[in-house]
Amino acid sequence: MSRELSHHQAFQTQCLKELGVVSWMQGQTPVQGEVFRTPQPWARADGVTPIAPAQPQIIPESTFKPPVPAATAVDEKQKDASVADLRRQLGAAPEVIVEDLQPIEEILAPVETTAPEIALGLPIPSQMCAYMLAGQLLLITDLPSSFQEQDQLDKLALSLAKALLKQEVGEWSVALYQWPGKLKNHHLVQRQDWAVGAFEQFLHNQSASQMPQRVILAGDHCVQYFAALAEQHPLKNLPRAQVHSLPQMLRIPELRKEAWQVMQRSFA
Protein backbone atom coordinates (compact mmCIF):
# COMPACT_ATOMS: atom_id res chain seq x y z
CA MET A 1 0.00 0.00 0.00
CA SER A 2 1.48 3.33 -1.10
CA ARG A 3 0.89 6.72 0.33
CA GLU A 4 1.99 10.17 -0.90
CA LEU A 5 4.21 12.03 1.53
CA SER A 6 4.91 15.68 1.73
CA HIS A 7 8.24 16.97 0.53
CA HIS A 8 9.40 17.53 4.11
CA GLN A 9 8.43 14.01 5.24
CA ALA A 10 10.04 12.42 2.19
CA PHE A 11 13.28 14.29 2.83
CA GLN A 12 13.34 13.14 6.48
CA THR A 13 12.66 9.54 5.45
CA GLN A 14 15.49 9.58 2.92
CA CYS A 15 17.91 10.99 5.50
CA LEU A 16 16.91 8.24 7.98
CA LYS A 17 17.42 5.58 5.30
CA GLU A 18 20.93 6.82 4.59
CA LEU A 19 21.69 6.59 8.32
CA GLY A 20 20.53 2.97 8.32
CA VAL A 21 17.18 3.54 9.95
CA VAL A 22 14.59 1.68 7.94
CA SER A 23 11.83 1.74 10.57
CA TRP A 24 10.40 4.84 12.15
CA MET A 25 7.53 5.76 14.39
CA GLN A 26 4.31 6.95 12.78
CA GLY A 27 2.00 7.71 15.59
CA GLN A 28 1.90 4.58 17.91
CA THR A 29 2.61 1.96 15.23
CA PRO A 30 6.08 1.42 13.69
CA VAL A 31 6.09 1.86 9.92
CA GLN A 32 8.36 0.25 7.37
CA GLY A 33 8.53 1.05 3.71
CA GLU A 34 10.47 2.40 0.72
CA VAL A 35 10.39 6.07 -0.15
CA PHE A 36 10.76 7.06 -3.82
CA ARG A 37 11.85 10.62 -4.63
CA THR A 38 12.62 12.33 -7.92
CA PRO A 39 16.33 12.24 -8.83
CA GLN A 40 18.42 15.35 -8.22
CA PRO A 41 19.65 17.04 -11.44
CA TRP A 42 22.83 18.36 -9.83
CA ALA A 43 25.95 16.65 -8.41
CA ARG A 44 26.04 15.84 -4.73
CA ALA A 45 28.76 17.04 -2.39
CA ASP A 46 29.60 13.48 -1.18
CA GLY A 47 30.45 12.32 -4.68
CA VAL A 48 27.50 9.96 -5.03
CA THR A 49 26.19 9.99 -8.60
CA PRO A 50 22.48 10.82 -8.66
CA ILE A 51 20.10 8.67 -10.55
CA ALA A 52 19.77 10.17 -14.02
CA PRO A 53 16.27 10.47 -15.32
CA ALA A 54 15.30 8.34 -18.24
CA GLN A 55 15.77 10.07 -21.57
CA PRO A 56 12.50 10.64 -23.38
CA GLN A 57 12.13 8.72 -26.58
CA ILE A 58 12.34 11.06 -29.55
CA ILE A 59 9.90 10.22 -32.27
CA PRO A 60 11.11 11.16 -35.75
CA GLU A 61 9.14 14.02 -37.23
CA SER A 62 8.57 12.16 -40.44
CA THR A 63 6.67 9.43 -38.62
CA PHE A 64 4.20 11.87 -37.05
CA LYS A 65 0.95 12.25 -38.94
CA PRO A 66 -2.29 13.85 -37.78
CA PRO A 67 -5.11 11.43 -37.21
CA VAL A 68 -7.22 11.03 -40.28
CA PRO A 69 -10.82 10.05 -39.76
CA ALA A 70 -11.80 6.94 -41.56
CA ALA A 71 -13.88 7.46 -44.65
CA THR A 72 -17.48 6.60 -44.15
CA ALA A 73 -18.89 4.49 -46.86
CA VAL A 74 -22.12 5.87 -48.29
CA ASP A 75 -24.69 3.42 -49.41
CA GLU A 76 -25.67 3.79 -53.08
CA LYS A 77 -29.36 3.58 -52.22
CA GLN A 78 -29.04 6.35 -49.64
CA LYS A 79 -27.15 8.50 -52.16
CA ASP A 80 -29.87 8.06 -54.80
CA ALA A 81 -32.55 8.88 -52.20
CA SER A 82 -30.75 12.11 -51.26
CA VAL A 83 -30.47 13.19 -54.90
CA ALA A 84 -34.16 12.41 -55.49
CA ASP A 85 -35.14 14.37 -52.37
CA LEU A 86 -33.06 17.37 -53.53
CA ARG A 87 -34.78 17.33 -56.93
CA ARG A 88 -38.15 17.19 -55.20
CA GLN A 89 -37.28 20.26 -53.11
CA LEU A 90 -36.12 22.13 -56.21
CA GLY A 91 -39.41 21.44 -57.91
CA ALA A 92 -41.54 22.22 -54.85
CA ALA A 93 -40.09 25.67 -54.03
CA PRO A 94 -38.44 27.08 -57.16
CA GLU A 95 -38.85 30.69 -56.08
CA VAL A 96 -36.64 30.24 -53.02
CA ILE A 97 -33.92 28.37 -54.85
CA VAL A 98 -33.90 30.72 -57.83
CA GLU A 99 -33.58 33.70 -55.54
CA ASP A 100 -30.60 32.12 -53.83
CA LEU A 101 -28.93 31.43 -57.18
CA GLN A 102 -29.23 35.01 -58.42
CA PRO A 103 -25.90 36.85 -58.79
CA ILE A 104 -25.06 39.43 -56.17
CA GLU A 105 -25.57 42.94 -57.51
CA GLU A 106 -24.09 46.03 -55.97
CA ILE A 107 -26.64 48.78 -55.63
CA LEU A 108 -25.41 52.32 -55.22
CA ALA A 109 -27.23 53.97 -52.37
CA PRO A 110 -28.39 57.49 -53.20
CA VAL A 111 -26.18 60.08 -51.58
CA GLU A 112 -28.14 62.56 -49.53
CA THR A 113 -26.99 66.01 -50.49
CA THR A 114 -27.94 69.04 -48.55
CA ALA A 115 -30.13 71.43 -50.47
CA PRO A 116 -28.39 74.67 -51.39
CA GLU A 117 -29.38 77.70 -49.41
CA ILE A 118 -31.91 79.83 -51.26
CA ALA A 119 -31.38 83.52 -50.80
CA LEU A 120 -34.65 85.15 -49.84
CA GLY A 121 -35.43 88.72 -50.67
CA LEU A 122 -33.11 90.94 -52.65
CA PRO A 123 -30.09 89.46 -54.46
CA ILE A 124 -26.76 90.17 -52.79
CA PRO A 125 -24.27 91.31 -53.91
CA SER A 126 -25.65 93.32 -56.82
CA GLN A 127 -24.24 95.52 -59.56
CA MET A 128 -26.42 97.61 -61.89
CA CYS A 129 -26.07 100.38 -64.39
CA ALA A 130 -28.66 103.14 -65.07
CA TYR A 131 -28.95 105.27 -68.22
CA MET A 132 -30.92 108.52 -68.43
CA LEU A 133 -31.48 108.95 -72.17
CA ALA A 134 -32.71 112.25 -73.68
CA GLY A 135 -34.42 113.09 -70.40
CA GLN A 136 -37.28 110.73 -71.33
CA LEU A 137 -36.12 107.13 -70.88
CA LEU A 138 -34.63 105.54 -67.75
CA LEU A 139 -32.92 102.22 -68.54
CA ILE A 140 -31.65 100.09 -65.63
CA THR A 141 -29.69 96.93 -66.44
CA ASP A 142 -27.92 94.23 -64.45
CA LEU A 143 -24.17 93.89 -64.77
CA PRO A 144 -21.97 90.88 -64.04
CA SER A 145 -19.39 91.23 -61.29
CA SER A 146 -16.49 91.58 -63.76
CA PHE A 147 -17.88 93.51 -66.70
CA GLN A 148 -15.34 95.26 -68.95
CA GLU A 149 -17.32 96.11 -72.12
CA GLN A 150 -18.73 99.45 -71.09
CA ASP A 151 -18.27 101.05 -74.54
CA GLN A 152 -20.30 98.37 -76.30
CA LEU A 153 -22.93 98.57 -73.55
CA ASP A 154 -23.25 102.35 -74.10
CA LYS A 155 -23.68 101.88 -77.86
CA LEU A 156 -26.40 99.26 -77.34
CA ALA A 157 -28.30 101.46 -74.87
CA LEU A 158 -28.13 104.44 -77.25
CA SER A 159 -29.34 102.36 -80.20
CA LEU A 160 -32.31 101.02 -78.23
CA ALA A 161 -33.26 104.53 -77.08
CA LYS A 162 -32.93 105.91 -80.61
CA ALA A 163 -35.20 103.20 -82.04
CA LEU A 164 -37.74 103.53 -79.23
CA LEU A 165 -37.87 107.34 -79.05
CA LYS A 166 -37.47 107.71 -82.84
CA GLN A 167 -35.03 110.57 -82.42
CA GLU A 168 -31.37 111.22 -81.89
CA VAL A 169 -30.19 110.97 -78.30
CA GLY A 170 -28.12 114.08 -77.70
CA GLU A 171 -27.99 114.09 -73.94
CA TRP A 172 -27.49 111.01 -71.83
CA SER A 173 -25.81 110.02 -68.57
CA VAL A 174 -24.82 106.75 -66.96
CA ALA A 175 -24.34 105.81 -63.29
CA LEU A 176 -23.26 102.65 -61.50
CA TYR A 177 -24.98 101.04 -58.52
CA GLN A 178 -23.18 98.45 -56.36
CA TRP A 179 -24.32 96.71 -53.21
CA PRO A 180 -21.40 94.90 -51.53
CA GLY A 181 -23.15 91.96 -49.92
CA LYS A 182 -24.76 90.67 -46.77
CA LEU A 183 -24.75 92.89 -43.72
CA LYS A 184 -22.27 91.81 -41.05
CA ASN A 185 -24.31 93.00 -38.08
CA HIS A 186 -26.33 90.02 -36.86
CA HIS A 187 -29.14 92.32 -35.73
CA LEU A 188 -29.52 93.70 -39.28
CA VAL A 189 -28.77 90.59 -41.35
CA GLN A 190 -32.46 90.05 -42.22
CA ARG A 191 -33.16 93.71 -42.96
CA GLN A 192 -33.44 94.93 -46.56
CA ASP A 193 -34.19 98.59 -45.96
CA TRP A 194 -30.54 99.57 -46.32
CA ALA A 195 -30.28 98.02 -49.78
CA VAL A 196 -33.68 99.39 -50.84
CA GLY A 197 -32.79 102.82 -49.48
CA ALA A 198 -29.51 102.86 -51.39
CA PHE A 199 -31.30 101.83 -54.60
CA GLU A 200 -33.98 104.47 -54.06
CA GLN A 201 -31.34 107.16 -53.59
CA PHE A 202 -29.60 105.90 -56.72
CA LEU A 203 -32.80 106.36 -58.74
CA HIS A 204 -33.40 109.78 -57.20
CA ASN A 205 -29.96 110.93 -58.34
CA GLN A 206 -30.75 109.92 -61.92
CA SER A 207 -34.17 111.56 -62.08
CA ALA A 208 -33.53 114.61 -59.87
CA SER A 209 -33.17 117.04 -62.76
CA GLN A 210 -36.00 115.66 -64.89
CA MET A 211 -38.58 112.91 -64.36
CA PRO A 212 -38.45 110.28 -67.14
CA GLN A 213 -41.52 109.20 -69.08
CA ARG A 214 -40.67 105.48 -69.46
CA VAL A 215 -38.70 102.91 -67.48
CA ILE A 216 -36.94 99.82 -68.83
CA LEU A 217 -35.84 97.14 -66.34
CA ALA A 218 -33.26 94.87 -67.95
CA GLY A 219 -32.41 91.90 -65.77
CA ASP A 220 -33.73 90.04 -62.73
CA HIS A 221 -31.88 91.98 -60.05
CA CYS A 222 -33.20 95.38 -61.02
CA VAL A 223 -36.73 93.93 -61.30
CA GLN A 224 -36.54 92.66 -57.70
CA TYR A 225 -35.11 95.93 -56.41
CA PHE A 226 -37.75 97.94 -58.26
CA ALA A 227 -40.52 95.72 -56.84
CA ALA A 228 -39.19 96.36 -53.30
CA LEU A 229 -39.81 100.10 -53.64
CA ALA A 230 -42.83 101.62 -51.97
CA GLU A 231 -46.03 101.68 -53.99
CA GLN A 232 -46.10 105.46 -53.68
CA HIS A 233 -42.78 105.83 -55.47
CA PRO A 234 -43.25 108.12 -58.51
CA LEU A 235 -41.37 105.80 -60.91
CA LYS A 236 -43.87 102.99 -60.28
CA ASN A 237 -46.64 104.99 -61.96
CA LEU A 238 -44.70 105.22 -65.25
CA PRO A 239 -45.00 102.75 -68.13
CA ARG A 240 -42.23 100.14 -67.89
CA ALA A 241 -40.92 97.13 -69.75
CA GLN A 242 -39.02 94.11 -68.41
CA VAL A 243 -36.43 92.54 -70.71
CA HIS A 244 -33.15 90.63 -70.52
CA SER A 245 -30.06 92.47 -69.34
CA LEU A 246 -27.94 94.36 -71.87
CA PRO A 247 -24.84 92.16 -71.31
CA GLN A 248 -26.98 89.15 -72.28
CA MET A 249 -28.08 90.98 -75.43
CA LEU A 250 -24.44 91.59 -76.29
CA ARG A 251 -23.69 87.89 -76.10
CA ILE A 252 -26.94 86.71 -77.74
CA PRO A 253 -28.07 89.06 -80.54
CA GLU A 254 -31.42 87.21 -80.86
CA LEU A 255 -32.46 88.66 -77.50
CA ARG A 256 -32.40 92.18 -78.95
CA LYS A 257 -35.29 91.35 -81.27
CA GLU A 258 -37.23 89.83 -78.38
CA ALA A 259 -36.54 92.91 -76.20
CA TRP A 260 -37.71 95.21 -79.00
CA GLN A 261 -41.01 93.35 -79.27
CA VAL A 262 -41.54 93.51 -75.48
CA MET A 263 -40.87 97.27 -75.42
CA GLN A 264 -43.26 97.91 -78.29
CA ARG A 265 -46.04 96.03 -76.50
CA SER A 266 -45.33 97.75 -73.16
CA PHE A 267 -45.17 101.30 -74.57
CA ALA A 268 -47.90 101.01 -77.17
Image (cartoon, rainbow, N blue to C red):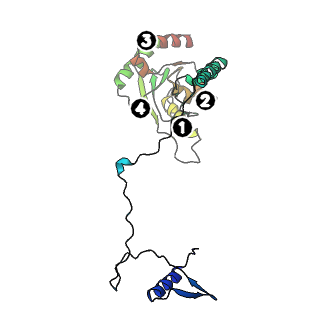
Report the residue marked by disc 1.
195
Tell me which amino acid carries mark 4: Ser
Q: CA distance from mark 2 to mark 1?
A: 16 Å
Mark 4 vs 3, N-terminal side: 4
Rate crowding at label 1 as few (under 14), some (14 to 19) or many (20 or more) other CA atoms within 10 Å: many
Q: Secondary structure at mark 3?
A: helix
Q: Which residue reaches farthest right?
A: 92
Tell me which amino acid carries mark 3: Glu
How far across and down, in percent of the image, does residue 56 sit? 39, 62
Q: Between 15 and 221, which is closer to the camera in this rendering? A: 15
Q: Secondary structure at mark 2?
A: loop
Q: CA distance from mark 4 to mark 2?
A: 28 Å
Report the residue marked by disc 2.
233
**Residue at point 56% right, 13% down?**
266
Mark 1 vs 4, N-terminal side: 4
Report the residue marked by disc 4.
145
Tell me which amino acid carries mark 1: Ala
Mark 4 vs 2, N-terminal side: 4
Q: CA distance from mark 3 to mark 2?
A: 33 Å
Q: Between 255 and 120, which is closer to the camera in this rendering? A: 120
Report the residue marked by disc 3.
254
The C terminus is located in which quarter? top right
Q: Which residue reaches farthest left?
A: 47
Tell me which amino acid carries mark 2: His
> Is any atom of residue 179 visible in this view?
yes
> Do the numbered discs 4 and 2 sit on residues whose CB atoms are within 8 Å?
no
How far across and down, in percent of the image, does residue 133 sit? 45, 21
